[in-house]
Image (cartoon, rainbow, N blue to C red):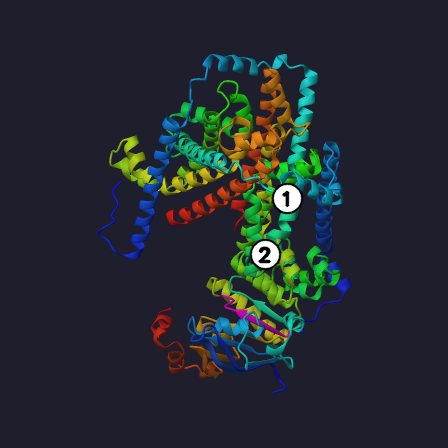
Amino acid sequence: MSNAVLSINNLQKTYAPNTKALKGVSFDVNKGELVSVIGPSGAGKSTLFRCINRMIEPDQGSSIVFNGLDIVDLNRDNLKNVRKHIGMVFQHYNLVYRLTAIENVLHGRLGYYSTLKGIMGLYSDEDVLKAGELLDLLGLSERKYFKCSNLSGGQKQRVGIARALIQDPTLILCDEPIASLDPQSSKVIMDYLKDITKQMGIPCLVNLHQVEVAINYSDRIIGVSAGSIVFEGTPGEVTEDVIKNIYGAELNDILQK
Amino acid sequence: MRVARNVFGKPKLKERTTSDILIRLLVITFLAVSAYTLFIRMEYKWDLFSAQTGLKFLARFIRFDQVPPKMMLDMVGRLLNTIILGVLTTLIGAFVGLVFGLLGARNLTNPKVSNVVKGIASFVRAVPTIIWVLIFVAGYGLTATTAVVGMAFHSFAFFVKSYAESFEEVDRGTIEALKATGANWFQIVFGAVIPSALTKLISWIALRSEINFTVAVVIGPAVGVPGTIGTMINNAARAGNYEVQGFGIILVFITAFLMEIVVTRLRQNSIVSNH
Amino acid sequence: MISYKSKSELLAKHPFALNFFKKRLLRFLLITAGILALASVGARLVGFQILPIFLKLPQALTRFFKLYLPPDFSEVSKLFEQLWLTVLLAVCSATVGVILAYFSALAISKTTGKIPVLRIGIRFLATLIRNIPSAIWAITLLMAFWFGEFLAFIVMALGTYGFMTRVFSDMIDETNTNSIEALEATGASYWQIIAQAVFPETLPVAVSWALYAVESNIRSSTIIGMLAGGGVGYLIGIYKHFRKFELLFTAVIFVVITILVADQVSTQIRKRIL
């Protein structure tokens, strides 16, 4: 238990009286682990991810313990403090395309600055240098001062990862990080995520569409269907029956891919 | 125009047909009202028009050689004054409008605040510019300052509306991403929202500068703001100095035309750069 | 946790990074200072001072209240008559302006304009009309036409025409050329293609712009009426001239109501058309 960075217990989310997106989800994420969440679209994966940093408010009675703090009970200031330590990577990168790569990376530090400094973009020398270093690490040394609108999809996603990394995160949430990318770029991104968990020791929780990728890269896989966890285990334990159980009627579509 | 109306009962097609009926009704109404106004309502039409006088005026309009050079210089100065009035109006409107545009954007505040701000803006917009100027003139007397402040009201409302719309078009994901890093409202606004919308904001400012130049020209003859090109054209027309009037019109035209070219460029750029 | 190299090592590795942000800040400060400097020079040239506005606010308000309040409703029937005329003029000039603009746009659009001379000529005319403010048109045409509603109609129609010609030629450029091509292939004549392909495709947009034109004509009717005569603007001009500010205030109230109503009506109709 002491090994867990994130520990979710009985997480529930009700949108309208009769639509429960999450029906009591519980699992842990441990240090140095890459955990994938798979499941059909509409299963509640996206809601699950957004509940973890409370971009969406979970129901009362849920418990999300991160670094020994229950996120569900936090007030706004403390919540911002927690968010500083959780990096997030998005399917559509969510960058400011008019700004350069390095400026977008530094957005990850905004939470650490006073309002005025953040507005004026008065970042400290250390942070600017760190941002440059991270872009180097992610193979973007030539693209640091490019406007993000001029980058390819894979490059944009690497800027997104650098933005998460500069937060000095304890955990990184990746919401469908490769769903908009071609196979080649997808592989690059997944390799980087694997490196981040193994070499930097930052656990990643990854929401994935492709079962194949999840099996290749994860330490542990969680299968979600209709707002509940229906499978939890190592990639080796994922059998055809398990997939059938997770995806149900959609199975044929998955296999045809 | 044939419309497949009665055969299909599907809602989607039905929607189209209501639109078709509406369009037809509007066209008929517009034409009928126009015919009534032009042929029945108006008491006079061409009877007072004389082509001869018109041509005589036109001939004198273009005799720029008869405008003394000193006068020309004076007029260019007044044109400059007018441009400055327009620019100052735009700057004030753009700055105050920015603050309220942020409050009016649905994705940056709660819906109540947004509705109130937008409501105020549409009321301010409904009062004609000239009336705002008259109101300020009543309070403060006729000066360049009152003219600018009066004109700025309309600009302010324009910017609130157009800025708020541009902010609302900013990708939700970008705002979400900054929220997720723990940034606060101001940091999100200045880090993500304004940079994303910047090209659009600039093109709104350019568009408004074009409009405000026209307004600054118009406000002269209507209220009598001294030292503007509009007032000068009006006085020249009354005094019968048609060469001066013609030259003034040319100056106004050239300025407006140049502004239009700049604005068109900017707008094309802002469309292109929208990834 | 990520371990970074020491600052001096990083500095050696990224020599431009710090400069980039310093330059950016400098550029921002320079632009802001430049705008402020230009604005203050301009303000001094025309004698613009913002402070008195705030300092003299109480006196200004009392003077305004004394002049304009309470609104005088004694001439409401006359006012309504002129307001009705304003609406009629706005619709009429919008219709005429839009129809003329539509045909001009056909002549100057890249897809439908076939005669080069006409294209250049009309483009020049529309540019000229558009870039001379309505008020200047009113002052100038006053000499050939006479003061009154017909002049107001012409000035508004010119305004609509200048603006809409540009809008419509863009619109026709954007309509899909496939249907035009298909009809051309069947051997249809120019006017047949316009009537069967271009017109139906663009009619809803054109009508919604016509509504916009009505709205904007009502908005500008105050000033045009003051300078050219006709409609509620004419009345406001008279009230202003004879310093009947209580009557003027009543007129303003009803003008604002009319504009708000017109705005709502045209938004609602446009929503249903498009």
Q: Residue B161: horizontal and vertical position, in percent?
A: 55, 48
Task: Give whichever of A207, B182 is nearer the camera.
Answer: B182
Magenta span includes B246: no
Looking at the image, residue C117 lies above or below residue C203: above
Task: Give whichever of A242, B122 is nearer the camera.
Answer: B122
Q: Residue C13: horizontal and vertical position, in percent?
A: 72, 59
Q: Nearer the viewer, mark 1 or mark 2?
A: 1
Judging from the image, what secondary structure is the residue with disc 2 in? Answer: loop
- Quick one: label 2, few (<14), some, or many (20+) residues within 10 Å? many
Task: Give whichever of C26, A240 is nearer the camera.
Answer: C26
**Three-letter amino acid code of the residue under disc 2:** Val
Q: Residue C255: horizontal and vertical position, in percent?
A: 52, 40
The chain under label 2 reads A
Q: Which mark is residue C148?
A: none
Looking at the image, residue A10 lies above or below residue C232: below
Which span is picked out in magenta?
A170-178
- Please identify the residue farthest to the right as the structure is shown: C8
Judging from the image, what secondary structure is the residue with disc 1 in? Answer: helix
Which residue is label 1 attached to? B93
**Three-letter amino acid code of the residue under disc 1:** Gly
Q: Is residue B162 visible?
A: no
Q: Residue C130: horizontal and vertical position, in percent?
A: 51, 30
Q: Which mark is residue A96?
A: 2
The chain under label 1 reads B
Task: Give whichever of C247, C254 is nearer the camera.
Answer: C247
Looking at the image, residue B162 lies above or below residue B52: below
Image quadrant assignment for residue C185: top left
